[in-house]
Image (cartoon, rainbow, N blue to C red):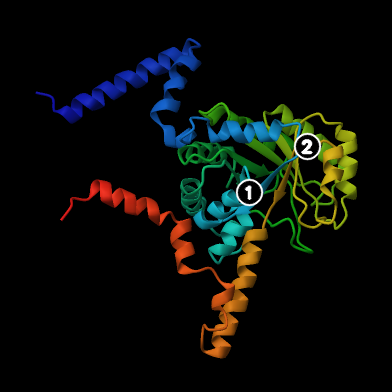
């Protein structure tokens, strides 16, 4: 006589077989739709609107949108409280807070663990800095599935080689991937996604590598054609000359995301006038936290007291508030037996 576990296994196998047959016959919508309702954590929040859908609307918006860097659950929570509608999960920032270099020294599974905490801590969509996709097309398409499992709204992948080299490092070679190979990587990621609104942002590194605007245009065209939701055009010059040249030649063929870390003095109206879709503040939370920690720890070490720093740091009660300790108290009253 079959056990309950065996029966469930057989039933699961039958359902998978039926779903496969439906997919082969073209009934993709019918079998994929229930996934959103039965796996709410994967795709949606309490409102029922998928995080991926909200990020896509931001990327396609006619208004200039902004997302803020975060690298942990608490920094994601703070970014949302400040009013940001989306979060950039920075590879540099996540690596830094783990104490390693931004050279893929943190494994992609370690990054996924950080992202899971970040997504659980906030209700706004997260676009993750996914470097090169952590390998070839096979690694990248597997990554998409794992990001969807954790409710991440999109991945930005850059057309460089694994392991990546940070774009802002001086004097380092910045080898680029073959255009066709990278376009096929994007296609593989698109084919792997289960959520139709999951976003692939193609990060073009031609300007970083010194290959010029013409090369950047050629790559942006190819990646958009491969299915990218938007292109991220990156430059490390202190003035936006290269970005301006690209935008003029691009002529608004598709959404463009920029990261003005080095050309931060450029007014935002400049980018509105050129129809830029999104600005990423890419590493400012981790830089602020590092400076604050350096100053506070040095002062405590010097003075052998915390008297001089208490007025300049968050209270312990603020930590409790940010981590929603009040919800736990309510839950304890509801779910723990009374004495």
Contact between labelled residues 1 and 2, with CB atoms less than 8 Å apart: no
Find the residue positioned furthest to the top.
Answer: 25
Q: CA distance from mark 2 to mark 1?
A: 17 Å
Secondary structure at badge 1 equals loop
Residue 131 — which label?
A: 1
Q: Residue at x 67, y 57 (%)?
A: 283
Q: Nearer the viewer, residue 278 or 246?
A: 278
Quarter of the figure with the N terminus:
top left
Left/right placement of residue 47 relative to residue 8 reads right
One can see residue 57 in this view = yes
Q: Local crowd at mark 1 within 10 Å, few (<14), some, or many (≥20)?
A: many
Disc on the earlier residue, 2 or 1 = 1
Reply above or below: 254 against 161: above
Q: Which residue is mark 2?
A: 219
Q: Residue at x 60, y 33 (%)?
A: 54
Secondary structure at badge 2 equals helix
């Amino acid at each position: 006589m079959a056990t309950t576990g065996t029966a469930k296994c057989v039933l699961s196998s039958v359902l998978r077989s039926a779903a496969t047959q439906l997919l082969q016959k073209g009934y993709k919508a019918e079998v994929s739709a229930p996934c959103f309702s039965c796996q709410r954590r994967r795709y949606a929040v309490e409102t029922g609107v998928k995080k991926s859908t909200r990020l896509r609307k931001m990327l396609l918006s006619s208004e200039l949108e902004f997302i803020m860097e975060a690298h942990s659950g608490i920094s994601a929570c703070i970014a949302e409280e400040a009013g940001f509608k989306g979060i950039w999960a920075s590879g540099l920032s996540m690596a830094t807070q783990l104490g390693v270099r931004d050279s893929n020294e943190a494994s992609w599974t370690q990054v996924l663990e950080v992202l899971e905490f970040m997504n659980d801590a906030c209700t706004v969509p997260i676009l993750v800095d996914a470097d090169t996709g952590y390998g070839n097309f096979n690694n990248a398409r597997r990554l998409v599935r794992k990001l969807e499992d954790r409710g991440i709204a999109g991945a930005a992948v850059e057309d460089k080689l694994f392991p990546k080299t940070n774009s802002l490092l001086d004097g380092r070679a910045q080898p680029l991937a073959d255009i066709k190979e990278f376009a096929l990587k994007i296609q593989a990621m698109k084919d792997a996604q289960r959520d139709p609104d999951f976003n692939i942002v193609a990060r073009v590194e031609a300007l970083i590598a010194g290959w010029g605007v013409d090369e950047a245009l050629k790559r942006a065209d190819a990646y958009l054609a491969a299915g990218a939701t938007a292109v991220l055009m990156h430059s490390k010059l202190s003035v936006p000359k290269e970005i301006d040249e690209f935008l003029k030649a691009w002529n608004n063929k598709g959404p463009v995301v920029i990261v003005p870390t080095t050309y931060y003095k450029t007014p935002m109206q400049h980018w509105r006038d050129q129809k830029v879709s999104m600005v990423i503040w890419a590493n400012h939370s981790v830089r602020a936290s590092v400076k604050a920690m350096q100053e506070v720890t040095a002062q405590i070490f010097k003075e052998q007291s915390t008297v001089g720093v208490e007025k300049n740091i968050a209270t312990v009660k603020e930590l409790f508030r940010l981590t929603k300790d009040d919800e736990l108290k309510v839950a304890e009253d509801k779910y723990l037996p009374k004495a």
